[in-house]
Image: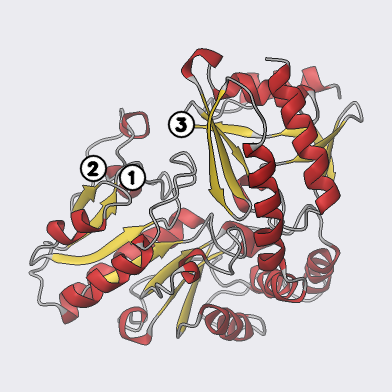
């Protein structure tokens, strides 16, 4: 089937909830993908960090094959051989106590919200149905009704009301605004340590630590959403580690599934995650043995290949290289580790035009917030790969 036929089928039969770039990916390997005509591209998107370990990592594929030969799905009504080991390994990696596995990042966020509310009613004396959670403007935590209820992006909300109450939004990066917003019904603060979908927005130095201190003083729960920033993406295993701002709950997803299978989790302290009781929350596929085996392999790859360290090193090279590109279309380059964004000037015609141009020179990227080109290559990327990408990014901007 040709690329045009593949695209025509999507246009005819798929719901119109995405606007893909005009390329049909047929296969991938490491940091590279190929379209149906055989043209090669470097993947600088990593499926929004779900492919931190690259396409078809051999160790992860081996885990898939091995587990598929044994058993793929067991309900949580029974035990399975992979759940306990994954929970221990993930809890130890995070420096926390307990793990609740789910499937998607949005499910993990919903789980954290339910848990924080339950904790607030049980431990903070908040009247029933009055719990409030503080969030940040321009956040992105998923697309469920509850999550879009506290989005500040009108397009995510339009036509989907009525919305879930119980959220207060403050400017991102402003710790004092969080402290001012805390009231008697506040049970938690839910934040991304870097806003990825919001435009790769990095908060001021000290912000993460200040959030931890504020929550400690107020006696409320701190939730870091590390679905995009976790598992080495920013140069640490988890972004909060840059400032030692240990959470009470942390949401994880994307890369946990190794780029081959949906897997997510909420990881937390005994004091907070321990409030849940049998029957209060669950998922048919959450904690299934196939997902857990893949997640265990992903954690081994992260640690054994020292990918957080590589992300820190290659991120510095890439950030410096991007900032050295002199072009009037580039307004700002920002990011941390291998989560980077190029904000373009308004007169360029939008970040999508830049992404289309970069596709022509062999780079898969995507725009966010209309004016930011997001760059997030697999963490296995080499120095030669980074240099190759920088040359083509510069070439792409020259051709605008």
- Quarter of the N terminus within the rendering: top right
Q: Nearer the viewer, residue 307 or 142?
A: 307
Vertical side of 241 occupied by 196: above or below: above
Residue 70 higher or lower than 58, as above or below: below
Quarter of the C terminus within the rendering: top right
Q: Nearer the viewer, mark 3 or mark 2?
A: 3
The one nearer the camera, 344 or 67, is 344
Q: Are marks 2 and 1 in contact (CB under 8 Å)?
A: yes
Q: Residue 194 placed where, x, y %?
A: 45, 53
| Label 3 neighbour load within 10 Å: few <14, some 14-19, many 20+ | some
Are there few (<14), some (14-19), or many (20+) residues within 10 Å of tag 2? Answer: few
Q: Residues within 10 Å of mark 1 (few under 14, many from 20)?
A: some
User: Which one is closest to the eye, mark 3 or mark 1?
Assistant: 3
Give me the C-alpha separation between circle 3 and circle 2: 23 Å
Task: Indicate left or right for 346 with 341 as reference.
Answer: left
Secondary structure state at the residue bearing disc 1: helix
Which residue corresponds to mark 2?
A: 163
Which mark is on residue 369? 3
Q: Earlier in the sequence, mark 3 or mark 2?
A: 2
Report the front residue among 72 and 99.
99
Camera sees residue 359: no
Task: Report which residue position mark 1 lands on.
Answer: 145
Q: Residue at x 19, y 76 (%)?
A: 217
Tell whether 277 sits left or right of 40: left
SS at circle 3: loop
């Amino acid at each position: 089937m040709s690329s045009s036929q593949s695209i025509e089928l999507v246009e005819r039969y798929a719901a119109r909830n995405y606007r893909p770039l005009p390329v049909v990916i047929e296969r991938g390997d490491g940091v590279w993908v190929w379209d149906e005509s055989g043209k090669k591209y470097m993947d600088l998107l990593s499926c929004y960090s779900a492919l931190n370990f690259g396409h078809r990592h051999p160790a992860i594929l081996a885990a898939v094959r091995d587990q598929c030969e044994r058993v793929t799905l067991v309900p949580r009504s029974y035990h399975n051989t992979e759940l306990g080991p994954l929970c221990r390994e993930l809890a130890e990696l995070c420096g926390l106590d307990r793990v609740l596995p789910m499937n998607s990042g949005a499910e993990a966020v919903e789980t954290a919200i339910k848990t924080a509310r339950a904790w607030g009613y049980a431990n903070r004396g908040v009247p029933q149905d009055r719990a409030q959670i503080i969030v940040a403007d321009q956040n992105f935590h998923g697309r469920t009704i509850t999550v879009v209820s506290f989005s500040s992006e009108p397009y995510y909300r339009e036509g989907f009301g009525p919305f879930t109450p119980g959220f207060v939004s403050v400017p991102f990066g402003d710790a004092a605004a969080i402290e001012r917003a805390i009231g008697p019904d506040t049970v938690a603060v839910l934040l991304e340590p870097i806003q990825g979908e919001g435009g790769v927005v990095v908060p001021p130095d000290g912000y993460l630590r200040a959030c931890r201190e504020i929550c400690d003083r107020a006696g409320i729960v701190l939730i870091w959403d590390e679905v995009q920033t976790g598992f080495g993406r920013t140069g640490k295993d988890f972004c909060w580690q840059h400032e030692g701002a240990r959470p009470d709950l942390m949401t994880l997803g994307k890369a946990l599934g190794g780029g081959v299978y949906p897997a997510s989790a909420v990881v937390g302290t005994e004091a907070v995650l321990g409030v849940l009781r049998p029957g209060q929350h669950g998922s048919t596929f959450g904690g299934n043995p196939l997902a857990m085996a893949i997640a265990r392999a992903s954690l081994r790859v992260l640690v054994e290949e020292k990918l957080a360290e590589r992300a820190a090193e290659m991120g510095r090279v890439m950030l410096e290289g991007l900032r050295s590109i002199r072009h009037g279309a580039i307004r700002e380059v920002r990011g941390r580790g291998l989560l980077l964004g190029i904000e373009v000037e308004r007169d360029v015609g939008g970040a999508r035009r830049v992404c289309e141009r970069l596709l022509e020179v062999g780079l898969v990227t995507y725009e966010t917030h209309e004016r930011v080109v997001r760059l997030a290559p697999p963490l296995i990327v080499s120095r030669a790969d980074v240099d190759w990408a920088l040359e083509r990014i510069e070439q792409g901007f020259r051709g605008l």
